Image (cartoon, rainbow, N blue to C red):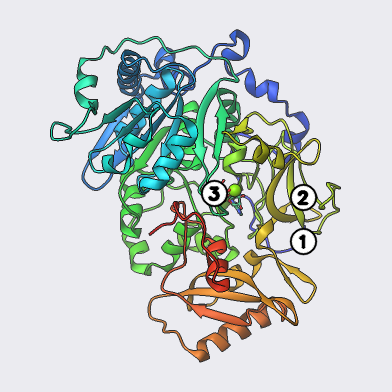
Amino acid sequence: MKGEQLESVVYASNMGSYEQACKRFQWEDVESHFTWSRTGKVNMAHEAIDRHVYEGRGHKTALLYCDGQREESYTFMQLCMESNRFGNVLRKYNVAKGERVFVFMPRSPELIIALLGILKVGAVAGPLFEAFMETAVKDRLEDSGAVAIVTTPELLSRIPRDELPELKHVFVVRDSSQLAGDVIDFKAEMEQASYEFEPEWLDREDGLIIHYTSGSTGKPKGVYHVQNAMIQHYYTGKVVLDLREDDIYWCTADPGWVTGTSYGIFAPWLNGATNVIRGGRFSPENWYRTIERYQVTVWYSAPTAFRMLMGANEEILEKYDLSSLRHVLSVGEPLNPEVVRWGWKAYGQRIHDTWWMTETGGQLICNYPEMAIKPGSMGKPLPGIEAAILDDEGNVLPPNQMGNLAIRTGWPSMMRKIWNNPAKYDEYFRFSGWYVSGDSAYMDEDGYFWFQGRIDDVINSSGERIGPFEVESKLVEHPAVAEAGVIGKPDPMRGEIIKAFIALREGYEPSEELKEEIYRFVRGGLSAHAAPREIEFKDKLPKTRSGKIMRRVLKAWELELPTGDLSTIED
Ligand code: ATP
Ligand code: MG
């Protein structure tokens, strides 16, 4: 193998050797773990929660919740009963199979219970970020034709009910006695509802969840997933998250985006793990305290969080005992090699990058516990998944050539439609037999995949194609740089030049000398054509709530164009 790599951790894993696993892999084998694969009748909430009660694990802790004010724990039995109650509430209001029901509230046990109750009546869950403002909320409820929503008193005013004729029921969690209008008191209804409930038994192709994507590239789209996706959630929970029965698992993502449901709810509970959910805002102290307090063993987070933790002062790291960690993973954005190296020093853990998208429903290209990691690579396709790099005509490219990252169609958690937008859906499948991701990447001769950028973000400078990620990763190696976003700026001579937007670390001041130094740093470390000829310092970079740098916003700033849909921007 070429290039830098970190040797794999040697411990008994759930997968065995990668090559062997690929050879003998069959989706039918994974399916056979579910009784419904024979009977045909399925319900995600039953599989993730109730099944453990029937199989004698009802008293095991399913959920550890904290947010700085509240701290609660729930067994599988308790989650089963509480979600049964909400199932009964929804049935009382005649919410039926296939209808869309949203949750719009901060992370909390009520959010989880509501979401499970929605699944139990066979409705399609629609999770929304608490930070969405009125227009964003309206667009999503309107597009999906939502019939009900569960929210909090604080967020209620952002739901323009008189403009949403299809929205029949608004459930308000916590005291709603002071609220005007015909809202329904969640708590009062729950208190009256029975713990007994027969879930709606569904077909594997019946709806599960609709996620409006975070919109890094433009208008949000309603990505629709079905029950069948659980096969992938279960399987990747086992072989990628490496979940075992005694694990305490923490996924830091909000259920408002797909990682927070596929891997914040479904995968851990399908595998019977104890699941930590932390509400409240990010701070290095709060996060490390959470790991220490619950003895978290498997931790799934995002590059933006790791970069912020890397930027925090060293003493914080000293203060907390993080030795319970045995497996750390990342998703959402390219994971800079510098961060992987730092993670190894700071936690004694290799941070395992995983690549997938809202549309794919589950992980597809990953670094498994048993693989050697090449820092900067997102790893190899999951056994059962075929990935390739295609040119713009749909031909498979040889190793080391940059092109369209594509996946052979037909994995269990692939989206089944884009709500109300069949034309958009068809674009992903424009080359027969392939799902085209919209990301640009290459594969090396060892079969590792290397992310380069979104197709639209790839820069063409003096005839060279440059992925912004490579430049950004070099930039964050510079001691002054906390975060960097790189775009192509039109240039009469070179086609495009590289422009970098940079947020500095604490203690560094913007200056012309620093620009020059950073330029030379990239030029010397990477190449002349990849060095940013223009640098602009910013206090902060525009990011989505799920932590992605919004390069299209940087580009719009630069070209003085409209910034487009900003509903998912952080602040
Ligand atoms: P939209 O499609 O609406 O613009 P989005 O693409 O940001 O939103 P997601 O589906 O949450 O919404 O993100 C998937 C994208 O995130 C991938 O296509 C890829 O660009 C990026 N991504 C995810 N994981 C990784 C990873 N491990 N390495 C590099 N990029 C990643
Ligand atoms: Mg996308």
- The answer to whether mark 1 and mark 2 are in CB contact below 8 A is no
| Type of amino acid under label 1 | Lys
Counting from the top left corner in percent of width and height, residue 113 is at 34, 27
> For this rendering, which residue is in front, 284 or 523?
523
Residue picked out by circle 1: 2
Q: Earlier in the sequence, mark 1 or mark 3?
A: 1
- Looking at mark 3, is its residue's CB closer than 8 Å to ligand 1? yes
Mark in front: 1 vs 2: 2
Counting from the top left corner in percent of width and height, residue 108 is at 30, 38
- The answer to whether mark 2 and mark 3 are in CB contact below 8 A is no
| Type of amino acid under label 3 | Lys
Residue drawn at 68 percent across, 31 percent down: 411
Determine if residue 244 is in view: no
| Type of amino acid under label 2 | Gly
Residue drawn at 44 percent across, 45 percent down: 253
| Horizontal side of residue 216 vs 3, given as left or right | left
Point out the image quarter for the C terminus: bottom left
Local crowd at mark 3 within 10 Å, few (<14), some, or many (≥20)? some
Residue drawn at 58 percent across, 36 percent down: 361
Point out the image quarter for the N terminus: bottom right
Mark in front: 2 vs 3: 3
Residue drawn at 31 percent across, 13 percent down: 92
Circle 3: element type: loop
Residue picked out by circle 2: 447
Residue picked out by circle 3: 219
Vertical order, 501 against 21 (above or below): below
Counting from the top left corner in percent of width and height, residue 205 is at 60, 20
| Horizontal side of residue 240 vs 187, given as left or right | right
Counting from the top left corner in percent of width and height, residue 350 is at 55, 54
> For this rendering, which residue is in front, 199 or 553?
553
Determine if residue 430 is in view: yes
Local crowd at mark 1 within 10 Å, few (<14), some, or many (≥20)? few
